[in-house]
Image (cartoon, rainbow, N blue to C red):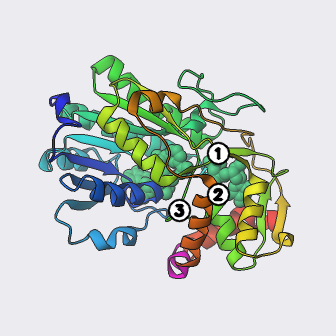
Amino acid sequence: MREAARVGTEMDMRVLVTGGCGFIGTNVVRRWRSERPDWTLVNLDKLTYAANPENLADLERDPKYIFVRGDVGNEELVSHVLESRKIDAVVHMAAESHVDRSILGPGIFIESNVRGTQVLLDACKRAKVSRFVMVSTDEVYGSLGPTGLFTESTPLAPSSPYSASKAAADLIALAYHHTFEMDVVVTRCSNNYGAFQFPEKFIPLMITNAMRDESLPVYGDGGNVRDWIHVDDHATGILAALEKGKAGETYNFGGSSERRNIDVAKQILAQLKKPETLLKFVQDRAGHDRRYAIDASKAKRDLGWSPAHDFENGLAETVRWYVGHPEWIEKTRSGEYRNYYDKQYGARLA
Ligand code: NAD
Ligand code: TYD
């Protein structure tokens, strides 16, 4: 290990972020470049269907931003990046992230999320990286009934191949702390929304379908509840965990904004002035978790973190962002997305 004290105290930290061309990664890189201008950010991303390097195109000439295309499961490459770029800390966000895709094909989730995380951890251990932040998810806790909140001590009970792969990665990271005394901090955040989210996820899918007057596929009875958080608030949470988190600890982040899916879909339609007749209740997701809700009091108390966005304003701002970026939407919705959409929704919307 390099001296843990480097993290959070040094002006010139060199941080490897993985998955920086995805939704959260893009927002993290953009925000941290302006909030921590002295840091160097190295972004390792494989560029899967979910990535969009153009999101960060304006940083191409920024000497403190370096993009490396590659897989976190490529041992040689990861070790080379850690050594040659003299990385102090790693923030691991790269993952296959969509539950529905994990139901259609779990294999890549195990490969990237589980094996990829283990390879990255091993490389960080060898390179004596000062801190490893594992960006996990509240989905590792499974599903809640009508009441109660997830705390950091809620037992892990993931239900989808996606959440099971994230739980494995999350626990492997904690095991590297316990067994090898690696400096690991785990974050578990609720559902994010905001700019640059790939339109396979609920909120951008509803917005982009409504913009085109296409049906909004609502799974089951629409009564499933998610606890929404603005992606910027997640980005400040991960930063706080990196700088102030205690090794071996886990921190929940959430926006205290529990909403039923059907209500969110109706809000989006109202903002876009589209009719509710576009709503279409379709066959439910297999094993669909009913409710997520986060108790983030530990992060508030120990990291001094709190969310800055309220859901209604954040959602309105997000809808405006999509309306203002038709070319971005067109690009993400072409090619591979079309095949996925037909496979996922063809029979459901027929
Ligand atoms: P995303 O799918 O938008 O982006 C994932 C990024 O990781 C993409 O750029 C992709 O190319 C890259 N990637 C995938 N496999 C890779 C590999 N093997 N090697 C290198 N790069 C690879 O996902 P997101 O929504 O931005 O989520 C980022 C992280 O945050 C994930 O770990 C996810 O589990 C976690 N998370 C997401 C949410 C959410 O609501 N989106 C909530 C909590 C936690
Ligand atoms: P999603 O954005 O996939 O996030 P997660 O499943 O990881 O929480 O889905 C959010 C909620 O929206 C979830 O309850 C499933 C539901 N949903 C739909 O009703 N229709 C859809 O087309 C999608 C993608 C999701």
Residue 224 falls left or right of residue 317: right
Residue 257 numbered mark, or none? 1
Main SS of the magenta part reads helix
Q: Earlier in the sequence, mark 3 or mark 2?
A: 3
* Region in magenta: 325-332
The amino acid marked with disc number 2 is: Glu
Residue 187 falls left or right of residue 61: right
Q: Nearer the viewer, mark 3 or mark 2?
A: 2
Q: Earlier in the sequence, mark 3 or mark 1?
A: 3
Residue 197 numbered mark, or none? 3
Where residue 41 sits in the image (x, y, percent)? 24, 54
At 33% from the left and 17% from the top, the residue drawn is 179
Q: CA distance from mark 1 to mark 2?
A: 9 Å
Where residue 146 sits in the image (x, y, percent)? 78, 33
Which image quarter holds the C terminus? bottom right
The residue that disc 2 covers is 312
Which image quarter holds the N terminus? top left
Where residue 76 sits in the image (x, y, percent)? 23, 46
